[in-house]
Amino acid sequence: MITQASLVAAFGIGAAWAVRGRSSSVFGPSRWRGEAGRKALALTFDDGPSPSTPLFLDILAEHHVQATFFQVGANVERNPKIARAVVAAGHEIGNHSYSHTNFALKSAALIGSDFARAQTAISETSGVLPTLVRAPFGVRWFGFREMQAQLGLKGVMWTVIGLDWKLPASGIADRVLKNASDGGIICLHDGRGTEQNPDVSPAAEAVRRLVPALMATGYHFVTVSELLWPTK
């Protein structure tokens, strides 16, 4: 027998998937993985730049890996030299909003203005206009689709997220290594929201471990754009 409670629960589950589901495109077009067959992975970092971002850049440079950094506009303005260093190192830049707000229940106007402000902050600071967007917390809402269209941004989620805000380095690395798959997008963090000097050392140490481990099994790393929209 279908009860009212079960219908409410089912609606809640469906709504949660629409808002945060990695494969959901309800509130705007989005991709969460690429096609298999190239033994390729995209390594992505959210919430930067932060004072710790250069540590990630050094590790990536050591292994000749190009990554995609989804940056917060407020952090770009706070750390302009680091923001430019990410671009100078050849990494791809994506828009991760200006304020790192959870946009659930927020107005379409607020969503549009916040991401537009991030586009301006990133382009004026780094000289790069992002073509990719990832919502903070993976939360998309009414107005997100319109914002993407107006700013010309392609939505990106992830295949595996490292939970690096709560796990130690070993746990982060193990989680990524167990769940990485051909065509996958890995989500880690080189910042923490809009904190000025966050401790992201567990994530950095995890990257130090997992990059060579994945390369040893035959994977190579590409940017998100190279993974999802390869040139032929």
Image (spheres, rainbow, N blue to C red):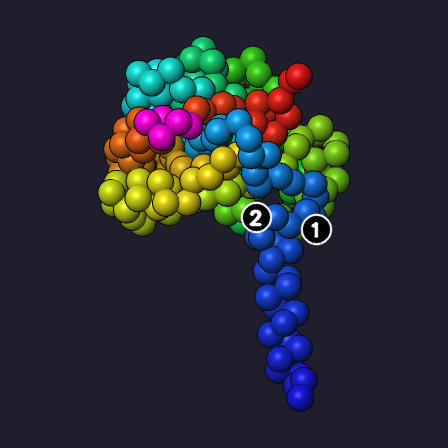
Does residue 216 show up magenta in the picture? yes
Q: Quadrant of residue 36?
A: top right
Residue 115 location (% of width, % of height)? 62, 34
Which residue corresponds to the image point at 64% horizontal and 63% vertical from the top-left?
Answer: 14
Q: Quadrant of residue 13?
A: bottom right
In the image, is 143 to the left or to the right of 124?
right
Amino acid found under the numbered disc labelled 1 = Val
Say which residue appears at 64% left-offset and 55% top-offset: 18
Q: Which residue is mark 1?
A: 26
| Foreground of the two, 33 or 51 | 33
* Quadrant (top left/top right/bottom left/bottom right) for the C terminus: top right
Query: In the figure, 85 relative to 171: above or below?
Result: above
Residue 97 percent coordinates (x, y) = 56, 36
Disc 2 marks which amino acid?
Answer: Arg
In the rendered image, is residue 87 in sight? yes
Query: Label 1 to label 2, Cα distance in Å?
Result: 11 Å
Q: Which mark is residue 22?
A: 2
Instruction: Label 2: state its secondary structure.
Output: loop
Tell me the residue at 56%/38% (across/down). 33
- Taking the spot 68% from the left edge, 47% from the top edge, the residue there is 25
Front-most of 181 and 26? 181
Q: Position of residue 8 (x, y in %)?
A: 64, 76
Quadrant for the N terminus in the image: bottom right
Magenta range is 215-219
> Tag 1: Cα neighbours inside 10 Å, few (<14), some, or many (≥20)?
some
Residue 164 seen in this snapshot: no
